[in-house]
């Protein structure tokens, strides 16, 4: 009977440690996902603002062609 109780307590402690490790790992994963989500938002805003990077380069080439005409 004592062996069963000892095993049960030991197993409970092992599982509690494992649960804590998994909580920490989950926190890290959620943090990584939040960072990626923020990066997606920033990148999406950049794409909208620059038309995927094309609008900024078009402005530069137009201003260069205007300066050549003058």
Image (spheres, helix red, strand yellow):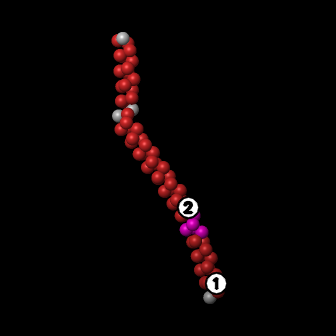
Q: Mark 2 points at which residue?
A: 24
Q: In this view, does 28 lie to the left or right of 5?
A: left
32, 3: nearer the viewer:
32
Q: Is residue 16 above or below residue 30?
A: below
x, y percentage for residue 51?
35, 34
Image quadrant occupied by the N terminus? bottom right
Q: In this view, does 46 lie above or below 37?
A: above
Q: In this view, does 29 lie to the left or right of 43?
A: right
Label 2, residues with CA under 10 Å away: few <14, some 14-19, many ≥20? few
Q: In this view, does 15 lie to the left or right of 46?
A: right
Quadrant assignment, res 47: top left
Residue 58 numbered mark, or none:
none
20, 34: nearer the viewer:
34
Single out the mark in the foreground, 2 or 1: 2
- Real-space Cα distance between discs 2 and 1? 32 Å
x, y percentage for residue 22?
54, 64
């Amino acid at each position: 009977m004592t062996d069963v109780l000892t095993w049960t307590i030991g197993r409970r402690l092992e599982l509690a440690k494992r649960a804590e490790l998994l909580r920490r790992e989950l926190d890290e994963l959620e943090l990584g996902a939040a960072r990626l989500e923020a990066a997606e938002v920033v990148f999406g805003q950049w794409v909208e603002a620059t038309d995927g990077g094309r609008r900024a380069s078009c402005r530069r080439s137009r201003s260069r062609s205007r300066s050549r005409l003058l």
